[in-house]
């Protein structure tokens, strides 16, 4: 059964919508809601910049352990051997990840033969060539990837942030 909307009730409804929008503007300090939400999803945590080591010292398949963004967060630096997403260094092939499995926090290790990061607890496999993507296993999210920067002047690789939440934390920066 269809109802006809009179011109009067249509205008009345329109007035209510306009009033609601005005109230919203007042609540947001005059910033339209769409504008206010533009920044959502963008975080600017105060990550420290931490030098991890020289890029050219690493050979393909070689790893280096470090902690970032604090001593309780173990990570692994890895030279994949070919350019990969997020890779830095002269060959864009150096990446780094948290070694705390995103499933239940067991320490993942690099399997050089298979070229993957493996968790010994429930056998989840992560792909370091694809942003730490979960390939199979119990984990439901990727391995947090350490964002790296490369300085060609002094050949240094520096950790500057983390994409993804470190296992067991409510925020990466404590
Ligand atoms: S803790 Fe790694 S798969 Fe469960």
Image (cartoon, grey):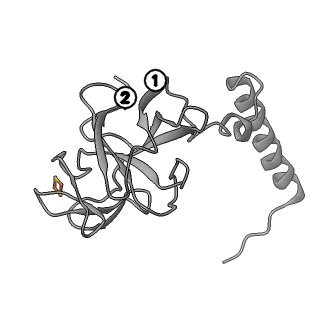
In percent of the image, x 46 and y 43: which residue is there? 55
Horizontal relation, residue 22 to residue 163: left or right: right
Q: Looking at the picture, tell me which residue is in the foreground, 34 or 121.
A: 121
Horizontal relation, residue 123 to residue 53: left or right: left
In percent of the image, x 48 and y 26: which residue is there? 49
Q: Position of residue 33 (x, y in %)?
A: 70, 37
Q: What whole-number distance in Å separates the C-alpha atoms at marks 2 and 1? A: 7 Å
Q: Earlier in the sequence, mark 2 or mark 1?
A: 1
The response on whether ligand 1 sits within 8 Å of label 2 is no
Q: Position of residue 38 (x, y in %)?
A: 68, 40
The answer to whether the residue labelled 2 contacts the one labelled 1, judged by CB atoms less than 8 Å apart, is yes
Q: Which mark is residue 69?
A: 2
The image quadrant where one finds the C terminus is top left
Indicate the quadrant where residue 122 lies: bottom left
Indicate the quadrant where residue 140 lies: bottom left
Q: Residues within 10 Å of mark 2 (few under 14, many from 20)?
A: many
Callout 2: SS: loop
Q: Position of residue 159 (x, y in %)?
A: 45, 34
Q: Looking at the picture, tell me which residue is in the foreground, 139 or 153.
A: 153
Residue, far bottom: 1
Callout 1: SS: loop
In percent of the image, x 46 and y 45: which residue is there? 56
The response on whether ligand 1 sits within 8 Å of label 1 is no
Q: Position of residue 149 (x, y in %)?
A: 54, 38
Horizontal relation, residue 128 to residue 1: left or right: left
Q: Residues within 10 Å of mark 1 (few under 14, many from 20)?
A: some
Q: Which mark is residue 48?
A: 1
């Amino acid at each position: 059964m269809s109802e006809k909307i009179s011109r009067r009730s249509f205008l009345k409804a329109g007035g209510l919508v306009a009033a609601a929008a005005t109230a919203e503007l007042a609540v947001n300090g005059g910033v339209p809601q769409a504008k206010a939400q533009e920044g959502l999803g963008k975080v600017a945590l105060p990550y420290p910049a931490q030098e991890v080591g020289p890029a050219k010292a690493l050979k393909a398949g070689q790893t280096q352990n470090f902690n970032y963004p604090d001593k309780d967060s173990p990570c692994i630096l890895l030279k994949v051997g070919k350019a990969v997403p997020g890779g830095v260094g002269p060959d864009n092939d150096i990446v780094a990840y948290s070694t705390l499995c995103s499933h239940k926090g067991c320490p993942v290790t690099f399997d050089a033969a298979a070229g993957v990061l493996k968790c010994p607890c429930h056998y989840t496999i992560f792909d370091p060539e694809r942003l730490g993507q979960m390939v199979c296993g119990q984990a439901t999210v990727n391995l947090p990837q350490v964002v790296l920067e490369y300085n060609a002047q002094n050949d240094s690789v520096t950790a500057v942030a983390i994409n993804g939440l470190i296992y067991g934390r409510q925020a990466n920066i404590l």
